[in-house]
Image (tube, grey):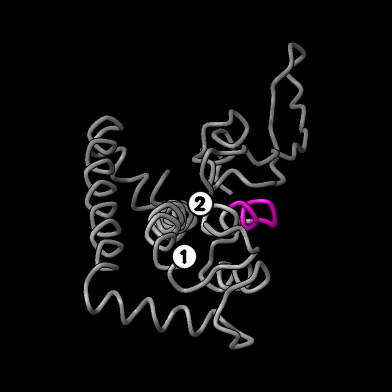
Amino acid sequence: MTNAVQHKAASGTLPYFMDEVLPITVEKTTKSTYVQKKTVKKARKSPAHQPGVFSPLVLSAKKVLGEAKLNKIRGKVIGLHSDVIAKFVATNESPIGGAISDTLFAVMDKNKDGVLDEKELALAFETLGFSWLKEKQVSGILKRADKDDDGIIDYEEFRKELPKTLRTNLTKLAKKNGGELGFLE
């Protein structure tokens, strides 16, 4: 490690993705002109978002554009992506969307009894990558969708609940994936 990098690491001014636990040597001149050497392990900062493959690009863009401009661009891109999600979910009412709903329901109905129970819902959400939906949330979705209170979701209940659940959770998935890729630095 170069002296400049050592200095930045010691002072905590390295970008956090470079500021992992690094053994560094800090040299300090005391009054008696002796050089005191001390090895320090820097603890990794806990950023709001984790570093990802695009972190260097985002951090460079932040330096070039400035944080305010980058945030404005990021907001516009997120808005456009949210519109794509909304338009995709709106296809639920179209013939193509109906066919997709039919197929999705058939794939989710593992025991082929024509209804979805809580276990089938949980497995489908996990398969879709909605890892934040725990037992309590899956139960809440089931209760909200189950209009006749029989503890299961039939196809008509599924078709009515699908847009809301997809819109909410696809948006969360996009944010999660964006964070993991480093877009939200």
Pinpoint residue 107: horizontal percent, then vertical percent: 51, 84
10 Å crowding of disc 1: few (<14), some (14-19), many (20+): some
Q: Are marks 2 and 1 in contact (CB under 8 Å)?
A: no
How many marks can you see? 2
Q: For this rendering, which residue is in front, 154 or 105?
A: 154
Report the residue that reaches farthest toward the front: 148
- Name the residue carrying label 1: 157
Q: Residue beneath label 2, please? A: 51
Question: With respect to residue 36, does 98 lie above or below?
Answer: below
Residue count near mark 2 (Cα–Cα under 10 Å), binned few <14, some 14–19, many ≥20: some
- The residue depicted at 31 percent of the width and 39 percent of the height is 62
Toward the viewer: 147 or 72? Answer: 147
- Residue 58, position as x, y percentages in the image: 35, 48
Magenta span of residues: 134-140
Tell me where residue 178 sits by quadrant: bottom left
Which one is earlier in the sequence, the residue at label 2 or at label 1? Answer: 2
Residue drawn at (64%, 71%), measured in percent from left and top?
117
**Magenta includes 41?**
no
**Looking at the picture, how far across and down is residue 161, in whole percent?**
44, 60
Left of 130 or right of it: where is 61? left
